[in-house]
Amino acid sequence: MAGVYKSLYRRANKPFYIDRVSLRIYSVEELCYIITENAELIEKDIFSRDLAIWLEGECGARELAAEIIKLITSDARLVQFVKVILECAPYISDEEKNEIYEIIRDMVSSDIYHRRKSHADFFLKKERYMPAIKEYEQLIETVDEEEKFFLAELYHSLGIAKARLFIFNEAVDAFNKAYELDEDPKHEYMAKAAMRLSLSEKEYLAKVSADEANTNIINLEDDLFKINNEFLESEEYKELVNAKENAQSVSDYEAFIDKKICDLKEEYRRFV
């Protein structure tokens, strides 16, 4: 059984907002967790005087706050700030800490564009699509047009983020731009998938039948057929069938469906 560790400092009443990852934290432990889980995104601007004030005032971490101020004054390297914070986490092994320090050193030595892409990728992975879209679009505007492969990656990820928000027409445009840059078939496939989801079946068939150069349609339809069958075998679908079969009246089933739709809407709002 794993050991139980007592918190070194108290939990804050007022959270501290970390803009870099768009998260609010309430404790030193949460700060440690953010660093360990998102080492690629950590920048020196996180370790500000405001953070030091919050650590002392809200968490009672006077010594830790003083260490942060000392490092700020001496213009210390990023890894030194991280080491001071992770000293408050005895549950993280030395091996894990060394891995984090190495990641941070590598990130510091990488260029600003790849650091910003890591930031956007973080939002995409965490299903925070609006911040991801903002990051990708701003980065696309700053990258040199000659960086075709890097730009293609950005457009592809932008397309995924927009498709996840059902902005399919704009997703199609993003995937097509990615394909124009490096002609990777995965971009073309995703463009067709987004188009398929944005049109009715009749509109879609009319559009693709007029395009003799379409090579991804069969593969796409095969994949959609598999996905549909997986849904028919899923617990979610079985729940819908059982609710319909066991409903005492049509209004009962409609109320069940309304609740499901409200849950999906709330999930969508969270993504936005």
Image (cartoon, helix red, strand yellow):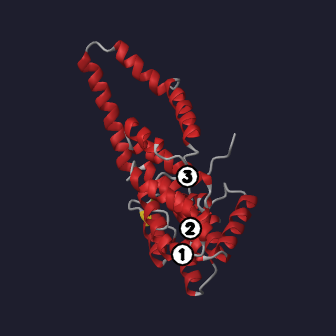
The amino acid beneath tag 1 is Val
Image position of 22 with respect to 72: above or below: above
Q: Are marks 3 and 2 in contact (CB under 8 Å)?
A: no
Residue 32 at x, y percent in the picture: 58, 61
Say which residue appears at 62% left-offset and 51% top-offset.
Answer: 5
Q: Distance between the residues labelled 3 and 2?
A: 15 Å
- Residue that protrudes farthest toward the bottom in the picture: 74
Q: Of the residues shown, which amino acid type is indicated by label 3?
A: Glu
Give how far apart the Cα atoms at labels 3 and 1 are. 22 Å
Residue to which mark 2 is pinned = 151
The amino acid marked with disc number 2 is Leu
What is the total number of numbered labels drawn onto the structure image?
3
Q: Tell me residue 254's x, y (percent).
A: 27, 24
Q: Point out the tag, 2 or 1, that comes first from the N-terminus.
A: 1
SS class of the residue under badge 2?
helix
| Residue at 36%, 39% in the rendered image | 264
Residue visible at 25% across and 17% down?
A: 250
Question: Dot 1, how many residues are within 10 Å of its Cα: few (below 14), some (14-19), or many (20+)?
Answer: some
Q: Disc 3 vs disc 2: which is toward the camera?
A: 3
- Which residue was labeled with disc 1? 143
Q: Tell me the residue that label 3 is attached to.
A: 188
Secondary element at image label 3: helix
Residue occupying the far right of the picture: 95
Q: Tell me the mark number nearer the camera, choosing from 3 and 1.
A: 3
Q: Which of the two discs, 3 and 1, labels the residue nearer the N terminus?
A: 1
Q: How crowded is mark 2: few (under 14 residues within 10 Å), some or many (20 or more)?
A: many
